[in-house]
Amino acid sequence: MTKTKKRELAAEIFRRLQNVHPDAHCELNHSNPFELLLATILSAQCTDVRVNIVTPELFRRYPTPEALASANLPEVEEIIKSINFFRNKSKSLLGCAQMLVEKFEGVVPQTVHELSELPGVGRKTANVVLGNAFGINTGIVVDTHVKRTAKILGLTAQTDPEKVERDLMTLYPNEQWTDVSHLLIFLGRRTCNARKPQCDLCNLKDICVSKDKFLRVPKKAQHGTKSEGAGRAARR
C-alpha cells in the first residue's frame, strides 16, 4: 500500500470511528492535571476500571502535590494495594509529588522532557497528561489496544510501541493525535476485542485489511463434519 493510500485509509478510519464513538475520551477519572498524572502512573499494566476504584480515596487524602509529598509510604500502599505492582507505584507516586514540589513549585509541567524527569513517568504517561489535561498534542498514546488495532487495520506493521507511534504520527495531523488514541482504544475495548472480536458489528469491516482473517467461515460451518456428511449420504 502506498503512503498516499495508507493516509486515505487512516482518514477514513478516523471519520468512521468518530461517527460511532463521538464521546471517545480518556477513561481515567480526574478533575485536574495532578490527578490525571497520578492515575496514569497507576494505570501501567492495570485496567482503567481498577484505577478508578482506588483513586477517589487517594485524591481525597492527598489532593495536592504538597500533601502527597509528605505522605507516609505504608498509608499510600494501603490505599492502592489492589493495583498491580502497588509497592513500586507507591514509591513512584511519592517521588513524583516530591519532585513536583521541589523542582516545579507544585505545578505539573507541560513538556515531555520535564514530565519524563518525574519518577514513574515515561513518554506514554507524558503524552496522556499533555494531551488530556492541557490539550497539547506531543505524540500518540500507544497502549495494548492501540498497538493491536492499528496493526489489524493495516496502519502499521510494527509491534514496538514507539515504532507504532511514529507510524501513526506520519498518518494523522498533529491536531488529531490525542483523539486517534482515544478512538482506537474505544474500538479495542468495545468492538475489536482481543479475545473475541465482534467483526459483524464493526463499521470498519469492509476496509479492515485483516477482515479475511477474522471473518472467514470455519470449514466445519461451510461443509459440516465428516460424520454429518456420511449421515446425509446414508439418508439419500
Image: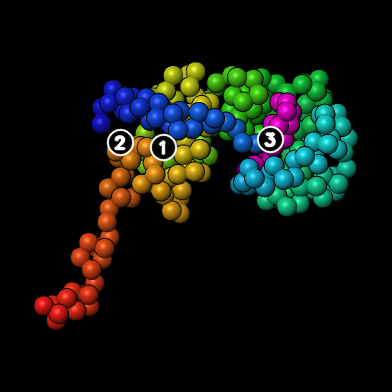
Amino acid under disc 1: Ala
Q: Is residue 136 visible?
A: yes
Q: Is residue 56 left or right of residue 180?
A: right
Label 3 to label 1, Cα distance in Å? 25 Å
Amino acid under disc 2: Ile
Numbered range of the magenta stretch: 30-44
> Which element carries disc 3, helix, strand or loop?
loop
Residue 202 picture location, percent across and down: 39, 41
Residue 92 picture location, percent across and down: 74, 39
What residue is pinned by disc 3?
29
Residue 207: which disc?
2
* Marks 3 and 1, the one that precedes in the sequence: 3
- 165 vs 109: above or below: below
Amino acid under disc 3: Asn
- 151 vs 5: above or below: below
Q: Is residue 161 visible?
A: no
* Marks 1 and 2, the one that precedes in the sequence: 1
Residue 148 picture location, percent across and down: 44, 43
Residue 150: which disc?
1
**Foreground residue among 11 and 6:** 11
Residue 235: which disc?
none
Rate crowding at label 2 as few (under 14), some (14 to 19) or many (20 or more) other CA atoms within 10 Å. Answer: few
Residue 105 picture location, percent across and down: 81, 20
On the image, which quarter does residue 67 sit in? top right
Q: Is residue 207 left or right of residue 38?
A: left
Q: Which residue is most to the bottom?
A: 234
What residue is drawn where x is 55% and y is 22%?
Answer: 138
Quadrant of the image for the C terminus?
A: bottom left
